[in-house]
Image: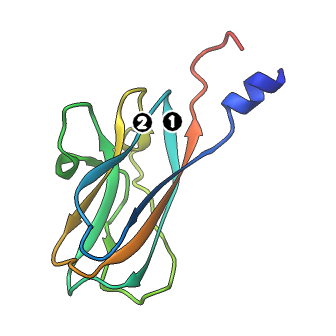
Amino acid sequence: MGLKAIARLAPVLAQYRTSAGEAADVHFFVADRDYEIMDVRETHSVAGASSSTLDVGVSASGTAPASLTTALSSAFALDSTVDTPVQATLTSTVANRLLDKGEQLSVNVTGTVTSLECSVSVILKPVRNNSSY
């Protein structure tokens, strides 16, 4: 396997960050090839209100972020302890963790998050679906 082939299989980091007053349902990464979501982590320096959550998942082109297919077994609780990174448990449904070329990683925020300041990191593993390299 050549260096170009190895580089195409290297993990990719996609990040979503928000400052106070900016949290919204958004797409934050468009897949340039097929990927599998391997890890999702969240931390916030200012918490959201009680019962506020943040979900991460996959949205097809033309689909609103709030209609994502979740990649997590449960959404992040944004009213949890600040400055404490949380690693998500991924869904056991592998198909929900796959991101096809052209699909988008999205976040869906619920509850009152006026002052929320957070960062979400997603590790993606390229899916080798081409045997020509």
- Give the structural element (helix, strand or loop) at label 1: strand
Q: Position of residue 80 (x, y in %)?
A: 36, 86
Instruction: Describe residue 53's horizontal placement relative to residue 131 as left or right.
Output: left
**Image check: 52 left or right of 33?**
left
Position in image of residue 28 (x %, y %): 37, 48
Residue at the disc numbered 2 = 99
Is 15 above or below relative to 125? below
- Toward the viewer: 25 or 88? 25
Point 59% across, 41% down: residue: 125
Q: Amino acid at mark 1?
A: Tyr
Q: Quadrant of the N terminus?
A: top right
Task: Please name the amino acid that badge 2 sits on.
Answer: Leu
Q: In the displayed image of the protein, which residue is found farthest to the right?
A: 2
Q: On the picture, is 5 further left or further right than 112?
A: right
CA–CA distance between discs 1 and 2? 5 Å
> Residue drawn at (66%, 13%), measured in percent from left and top?
131
Residue identifier under label 1: 35
Along the viewing direction, whichever of 127 and 106 lies nearer the viewer:
106
